[in-house]
């Protein structure tokens, strides 16, 4: 007999999070009863993953469960908040118990890592789609925002943006892995696939940034596009130092072996999406706190916020020299085009 809706929720989702004392009543009633701590602002975020739009059809269920929560935790991190509670609205084409078990496992592992309780949700039939909402706390008035940057601030990013987009490209290119005879190339591609399937939300970094950053955004659409969004809010421009852009060991292997050109690696870094890293600005007066942070976390200073002199001009520009790009020797016009394409990502564009 197929599993009924209530049995399904009970079996897979009642315990798919961390236990928390501030959950007065969780899954099972018409609503959850939650008790926010005094003196805190409540931060609420929501993000949806649609099969075929946000992840390839047939993606591992554990990855879908992980990503559905990770993309929300990344928004919470970008606000400098500590996550606490999640709601999960799941639309399923059919009840596939093996899929549900893996999905719940992927979700629960990340929820427990970040002490997030799953306090409710909704389960319906339809094309595969996962909506998650997460709530978290921040001491009153201390949330990070996209606004607050000033000319002169240092521009920083966590991790190595571009990896997830390269990994997705590999997942979507049949035969790419098999065609790579070299073991080190295959391993590098697999590492990048993992960065797409299991992104790491930078929750701890977000908490530390509350006291350091003037503005913050998480990277979902691509480094250049998301930086552009943050700069637009601040009516500022920025100059990126190409040589300071971080590159993972895996991407380094692919470039060194010629599996990916240096120019394509730059395209991934600036234009790729799905990284869920944090980009943020730091006033130079907090340079020593930033230095301490860069020693403890994978954070790179990649440029500087500057005045926006001409509101019709592009907000992002790049600084030469650009060692490592010798194979393609891009001209300044090439780089301007690359940047323009990288900024231009739009969910609703044709
Ligand atoms: P209602 O019909 O009142 O909206 P439901 O029957 O849909 O309630 O849900 C029963 C309980 O199960 C509620 O507490 C709801 O929050 C929870 N729930 C439903 N689907 C999920 C899910 N996918 N994950 C977690 N909790 C869920
Ligand atoms: Mg009800």
Image: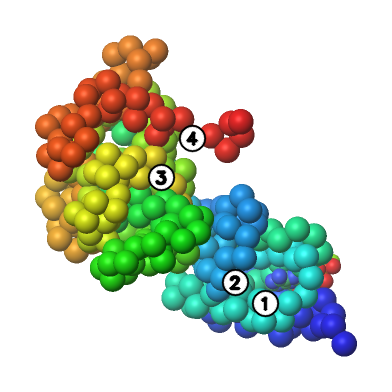
Q: Secondary structure at mark 2?
A: helix
Q: With respect to residue 52, does 3 lie above or below?
A: below
Residue behind label 3 places its C-beta within 8 angstroms of ligand 1: no
**Residue displayed at 36% across by 36% down:** 224
Q: CA distance from mark 4 to mark 1?
A: 32 Å
Proximity of marks 4 and 2: CB atoms separated by less than 8 Å: no
Which residue corresponds to mark 3? Answer: 272
CB of mark 2 within 8 Å of CB of mark 1? yes
Residue 205, given in percent of the width and then of the height, sits at 32, 59
* Tag 3 near tag 2, CB within 8 Å: no
In the image, 54 versus 71, the foreground residue is 54
Q: How many marks?
A: 4
Label 3 or label 1, whichever comes before in sequence order: 1
In the image, which disc is placed on residue 345?
Answer: 4
Q: Is the CB–ligand 1 distance for label 1 below 8 Å?
A: no
Q: Earlier in the sequence, mark 3 or mark 4?
A: 3
Q: Earlier in the sequence, mark 2 or mark 1?
A: 2
Mark 3 Cα-neighbour bin, 10 Å: few <14, some 14–19, many ≥20: many
Disc 3 on helix, strand or loop? Answer: loop
Q: Secondary structure at mark 4?
A: loop
Marks 3 and 1, Cα distance to the nearest angstrom?
Answer: 30 Å
The mark nearer the N terminus, 4 or 2, is 2
**Where does label 2 land, which residue?**
61
Identify the residue shown where x is 19% and y is 54%: 256
Q: How many angstroms separate mark 3 from mark 2 (CA)?
A: 23 Å
**Quarter of the view holding residue 100:** bottom right
Residue 74 in picture, x, y percent from top left: 45, 56
Which residue is found at the position 35% from the left and 15% from the top?
A: 313
149 to the left or right of 242: right
Residues under numbered marks 3 and 4 in contact, where contact means CB atoms less than 8 Å apart: no
């Amino acid at each position: 007999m197929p599993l009924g809706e209530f049995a399904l929720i009970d079996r897979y989702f009642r315990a798919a999070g961390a236990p928390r004392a501030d959950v007065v009543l969780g899954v099972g009633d018409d609503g959850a009863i939650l008790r926010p701590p005094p003196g805190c602002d409540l931060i609420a975020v929501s993000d949806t993953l649609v099969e075929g739009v946000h992840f390839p059809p047939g993606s591992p269920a554990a990855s879908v469960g992980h990503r559905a929560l990770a993309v929300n935790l990344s928004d919470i991190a970008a606000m400098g908040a500590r996550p606490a509670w999640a709601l999960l609205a799941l639309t399923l084409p059919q009840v596939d118990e093996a899929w549900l078990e893996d999905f719940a496992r992927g979700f629960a592992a990340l929820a427990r890592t970040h002490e997030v309780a799953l306090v409710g949700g909704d389960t319906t039939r339809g094309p595969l789609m996962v909506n998650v909402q997460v709530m978290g706390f921040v001491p009153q008035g201390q949330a990070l925002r996209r606004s607050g940057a000033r000319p002169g601030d240092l521009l920083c990013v966590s991790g190595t943006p571009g990896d997830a987009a390269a990994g997705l490209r590999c997942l979507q290119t049949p035969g790419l892995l098999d065609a790579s005879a070299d073991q080190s190339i295959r391993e590098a591609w697999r590492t990048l696939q993992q960065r797409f399937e299991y992104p790491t939300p930078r929750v701890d970094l977000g908490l530390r940034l509350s006291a350091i950053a003037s503005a913050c955004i998480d990277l979902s659409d691509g480094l250049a596009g998301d930086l552009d969004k943050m700069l637009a809010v601040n009516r500022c421009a920025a100059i990126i130092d190409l040589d300071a852009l971080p590159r993972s060991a895996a991407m380094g292997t692919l470039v060194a072996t010629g599996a990916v050109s240096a120019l394509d690696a730059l395209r991934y870094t600036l234009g790729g999406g799905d990284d869920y890293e944090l980009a943020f600005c730091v006033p130079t007066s907090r340079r020593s706190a930033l230095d301490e942070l860069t020693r403890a976390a994978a954070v790179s200073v990649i440029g500087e916020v500057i005045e926006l002199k001409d509101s019709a001009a592009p907000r992002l520009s790049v600084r030469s020299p650009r060692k490592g790009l010798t194979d393609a020797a891009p001209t300044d016009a090439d780089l301007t085009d690359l940047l323009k394409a990288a900024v231009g990502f739009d969910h609703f564009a044709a």
